[in-house]
Amino acid sequence: MNHKIIETLQVNLVFNWSIYSIIYNLIIKYAFIHAHKSIKGLSHYKNKYYWKYEHDNYVNFTPKKLSNFFFYKS
């Protein structure tokens, strides 16, 4: 019985994460970037979109992992 509960939880997690990743890709990678290209500081660097901080620090706007979106600096 517990094994079935664990399986259903795993399926729900994978399903919710897939929906989230689709929404994330549509909104962040396409709508936000292409609608806000003209914002000062958003630049095209090494074929990816980065937000330019002071002193040439860039935050990656095309992360493969969600943690990179919040914590990554090149």
Image: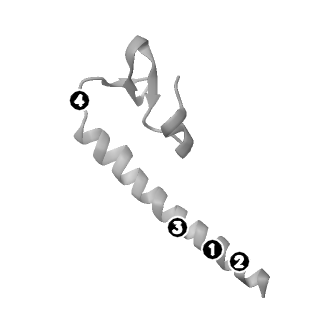
Q: Residue at x 66, y 79 (%)?
A: 8
Q: Residue furthest bottom?
A: 1
The N terminus appears in which quarter of the rendering? Answer: bottom right
Q: Quadrant of residue 14?
A: bottom right
Residue at the spot x=45%, y=28% of the render?
59
Q: Secondary structure at mark 4?
A: loop
Check disc 3 and report the residue beneath it: 16
Return the x and y of residue 19 as percentages of the image width and height.
47, 64
| 22 versus 31 height, above or below | below
Pointer 1 and pointer 2: residues touching (CB < 8 Å)? yes
* Residue that numbered label 4 is attached to: 39
Above or below residue 73? Residue 10 is below
Q: Which residue is mark 1?
A: 11
Residue density around tag 2, few if under 14, some if 14–19, many if 20 or more, within 10 Å? few
Query: Which mark sits nearer the N-terminus, 3 or 4?
Result: 3
The relative height of residue 44 versus residue 61 in the rendered view (above or below) is above
- Tell me the element at label 3: helix
Check disc 1 and give the amino acid type.
Val
Mark 2 sits on what residue? Answer: 7
Question: Along the horizontal axis of the image, is 27 left or right of 62?
Answer: left
Q: Earlier in the sequence, mark 2 or mark 4?
A: 2
Report, in whole angstroms, how far the alpha carbon at label 4 lies from the one at label 1.
40 Å
Could you tell me how far apart the alpha carbons at marks 1 and 3 are, in whole angstroms? 9 Å
Mark 1 lies on a secondary structure that is helix
In the rendered structure, which amino acid carries the disc numbered 3? Asn
Q: How many marks?
A: 4
